[in-house]
């Protein structure tokens, strides 16, 4: 005869308890249910991380591309000036304007050179972009005036451009150049001088970060005056640029920077830009062995990072 344990309930009442087998079955079923719930939770968490990684590369990449496109569309903007006069770097002016951390003193602020680039190399390793701050890819230089008119008082640490139809002159505040002796007709309008140098850094915050996350940086002509580094977007690991150069047969041919003749930079009519963006962290169980084509270059990876390749063609307006 099977003996059951009895448990008192209320007054004088008694009820049969669970057998050991029944309890083991209940525990087993409970563990199965909890395991299923845990699987659902882990799967949902993994899907959430995947969505976060995808959103991260989309947001960072598109923001970076928009920043480059904006600078390119403004390249060569001179306010009301129609002539590059005088056509010289800031360091060659009278008086000369010295720019701290200038990439190239022979060209800094030279607005006639509205665009310039270097193909998969860093020509500024000895000046504004130390070798440790450069991961690889192309370097893009863009110059123009800020499209928003500047008004007094003029900052003593910023570079402005006093613009008239017959020519213009850069200056550092607070005093505006006097164009009266040159018989330059009004209007005289003033703008900030913009020079930006885009490059890819091997890290986002500092060389000491771990793990390192690559990022798109730019040097901008700012307070000092100086070329000041700015973080544009994290996760950018490659920048490639090709330049649409106007040909004698009225066509446009896209060339890499080292294929553009020194005298042909003013013939650039459009620019192709590629950005390869990766997530800041890996996705376990995800393998990326994609080959990404960026102009004439193909980048093949084999790791656990999610990536996005973005590209755009920008027509130069000025």
Image (cartoon, rainbow, N blue to C red):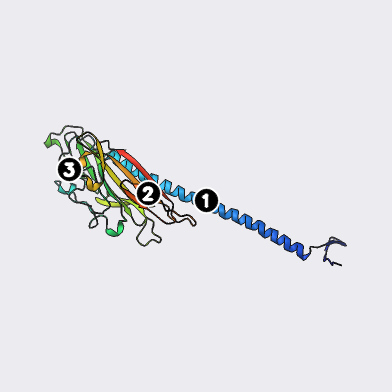
| Distance of label 3 from label 2 (alpha carbons) | 32 Å
The location of residue 70, given as percent across then percent down, is: 32, 41
Residue corresponding to mark 3:
263
Mark 1 Cα shell of 10 Å, populated few (<14), some (14-19), many (≥20): few
For marks 3 and 2 on the same chain, the one whose residue lies earlier in the sequence? 3
Badge nearest the viewer, 3 or 2? 2
| Secondary structure type for disc 3 | helix
For image coordinates 17% across by 43% down, the residue present is 263
User: Can residue 247 be seen in the rendering of this structure?
Assistant: yes
Neighbours of disc 3 within 10 Å: few (<14), some (14-19), many (20+): few
In the displayed structure image, the side of residue 95 where residue 207 appears, left or right: right
Task: Name the disc covering residue 292, or none.
Answer: 2
The residue carrying mark 1 is 48
The picture places residue 179, in percent across and down from the top left corner, at 15, 37
Which image quadrant: the N terminus?
Answer: bottom right
Q: CA distance from mark 2 to mark 1?
A: 26 Å
Are circles 3 and 2 on residues that touch, CB within 8 Å?
no
Height in image: 209 above or below 67? Answer: below
Helix or strand or loop: what does disc 2 sit on?
strand
Q: Nearer the viewer, mark 2 or mark 1?
A: 2
Nearer to us in this view, 258 or 175: 258
Earlier-in-chain disc, 3 versus 1: 1
Q: Residues within 10 Å of mark 2 (few under 14, many from 20)?
A: some
Q: Are marks 3 and 1 in contact (CB under 8 Å)?
A: no
Along the viewing direction, whichever of 184 and 174 lies nearer the viewer? 184
């Amino acid at each position: 005869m099977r003996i059951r344990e009895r448990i008192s309930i209320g007054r004088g009442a008694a009820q049969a308890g669970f057998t050991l087998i029944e309890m083991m079955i209940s525990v087993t079923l409970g563990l199965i249910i909890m395991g299923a719930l845990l699987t659902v939770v882990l799967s949902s968490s993994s899907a959430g991380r995947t969505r976060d990684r995808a959103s991260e590369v989309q947001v960072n990449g598109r923001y970076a591309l928009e920043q480059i496109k904006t600078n390119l569309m403004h390249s060569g903007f001179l306010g009301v000036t129609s002539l590059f006069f005088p056509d010289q770097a800031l360091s060659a002016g009278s008086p000369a304007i010295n720019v701290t951390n200038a990439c190239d003193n022979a060209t800094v602020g030279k607005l006639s050179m509205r665009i310039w680039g270097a193909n998969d190399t860093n020509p500024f390793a000895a000046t504004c972009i130390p070798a440790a701050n450069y991961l690889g890819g192309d370097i893009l230089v863009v110059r123009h005036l800020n499209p928003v008119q500047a008004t007094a008082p003029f900052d003593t640490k910023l570079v402005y451009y006093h613009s008239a139809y017959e020519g213009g002159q850069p200056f550092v505040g607070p005093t505006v150049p006097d164009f009266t002796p040159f018989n330059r007709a009004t209007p005289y309008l003033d703008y900030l001088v913009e020079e930006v140098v885009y490059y890819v850094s091997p890290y986002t915050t500092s060389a000491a970060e771990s793990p390192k996350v690559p990022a798109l940086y730019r040097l901008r002509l700012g307070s000092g005056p100086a070329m000041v580094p700015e973080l544009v977007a994290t996760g950018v690991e490659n920048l490639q640029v090709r330049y649409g150069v106007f040909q004698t047969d009225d066509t446009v041919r896209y060339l890499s920077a080292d294929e553009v003749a020194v005298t042909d930079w003013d013939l650039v009519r459009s620019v192709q830009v590629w950005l390869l963006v990766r997530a800041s962290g890996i996705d376990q169980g995800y393998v990326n062995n994609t080959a990404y084509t960026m102009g004439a270059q193909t980048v093949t990876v084999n790791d656990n990072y999610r990536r996005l390749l973005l590209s755009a063609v920008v027509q130069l307006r000025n």
